[in-house]
């Protein structure tokens, strides 16, 4: 069974631009969550999608958005990029029934986003 | 702010020794999970322990949970060089919000 696939692996952007990251979950998984990982703040929850609906949202500004398609694939978008958005963005999938904490999350290897 | 904090922040041991990492959290929880992250890679789920469980084993891993002290520990026995990674605990904060909060992580180095 293929794991969680994130594309691209690396991305370089400049301030003010926007970016779209993609995540393909494990087949059969309906929940997709996104996390931002930085040395200073650690791993922070961005949002979670389940059946094409945003089910949960972390404490991030509206510049961060996402969506999920009918095949469970998900994208996240960051607009008006800032230097502080430089981070590893991780996507995780799970079966989806119940809460996130009672089921293992399967992570992709992330997209390393660098803002110049 | 993050829900949990791992202790120690970094740990260096010889191959074959045991490694113990601790996680403390702030609010009541329903479940607690441990994950491993190799450098530059995603996280790998290791074990999940429910709030009504006190101890759980998986291979060379042993996890304990003390809800009265709001703490958990991960023990890796007979460590191997391949165990070198960062280890994180994750909880749901017990708020009913379906978020997952990760601790600050322990960087484990196993010296061959």
Image (cartoon, coloured by chain):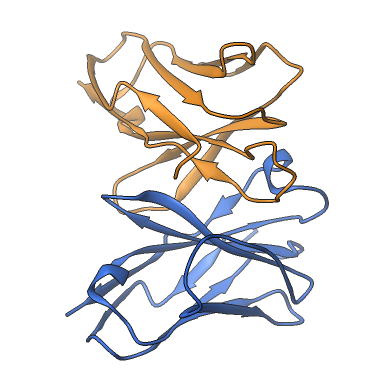
Chain colours: A blue, B orange
Which quarter of the picture shows residue B40?
A: bottom left
Place of residue B78 in the rendered image (x, y in percent of width and height, measured from the top left): 39, 11
Left or right: residue B62 compared with residue B94: left
Towards the viewer: A115 or B1: B1
Q: Position of residue A65 (x, y in %)?
A: 54, 78
Question: In the picture shown, does residue B84 fall above or below B71?
Answer: below
Which residue reaches farthest bottom?
Answer: A17
Residue drawn 35% across the image and 87% down it: A80
Q: Residue at x 41, y 30 (%)?
A: B5
Query: Residue at (53%, 18%) from the top-left corner?
Result: B72
Residue B8 showing in the rendered view: yes
Snapshot quadrant of residue B106: top left
In this view, the residue farthest toward the top is: B17
Q: Is residue A26 something one can see in this rendering? A: no
Q: Is residue A35 left or right of residue A67?
A: left
> Does residue B97 appear to the left or right of A77 in the view shown?
right
Q: Nearer the viewer, residue B67 or B111?
A: B67
Q: Residue A81 appears at what percent x and percent y?
A: 32, 82
Q: Tell me: residue A58, above or below residue B37.
A: below
Q: Residue furthest right?
A: A97
Q: Is residue A66 above or below residue A3?
A: below
Locate the C terminus of chain A by quadrant: bottom left
Q: Which quarter of the rendering shows the N terminus of chain A?
A: bottom right
| Residue in the foreground of this view, choosing between B82 and B3 | B3
């Amino acid at each position: 069974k293929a794991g969680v696939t994130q594309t691209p692996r690396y991305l370089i952007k400049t301030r003010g631009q926007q970016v779209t990251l993609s995540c393909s979950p494990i087949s059969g998984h309906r929940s997709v969550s996104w996390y931002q990982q930085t040395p200073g703040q650690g791993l922070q929850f961005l949002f979670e999608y389940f059946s094409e609906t945003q089910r949960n949202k972390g404490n991030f500004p509206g510049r961060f958005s996402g969506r999920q398609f009918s095949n469970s694939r998900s994208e996240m978008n960051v607009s008006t990029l800032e230097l502080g958005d430089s981070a590893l963005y991780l996507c995780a999938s799970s079966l989806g029934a119940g809460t996130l904490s009672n089921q293992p999350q399967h992570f992709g290897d992330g997209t390393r986003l660098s803002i110049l | 702010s993050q829900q949990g904090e791992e202790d120690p922040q970094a740990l260096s041991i010889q191959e074959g020794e045991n490694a113990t990492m601790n996680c403390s959290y702030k609010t009541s929880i329903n479940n607690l999970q441990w994950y491993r992250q190799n450098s530059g890679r995603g996280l790998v789920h290791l074990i999940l322990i429910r709030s009504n469980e006190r101890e759980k084993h998986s291979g060379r891993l042993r996890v304990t949970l003390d809800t009265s002290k709001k703490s958990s520990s991960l023990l890796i026995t007979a460590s191997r060089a391949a165990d070198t990674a960062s280890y994180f605990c994750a909880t749901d904060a017990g708020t009913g919000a379906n978020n997952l909060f990760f601790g600050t992580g322990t960087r484990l180095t196993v010296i061959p």
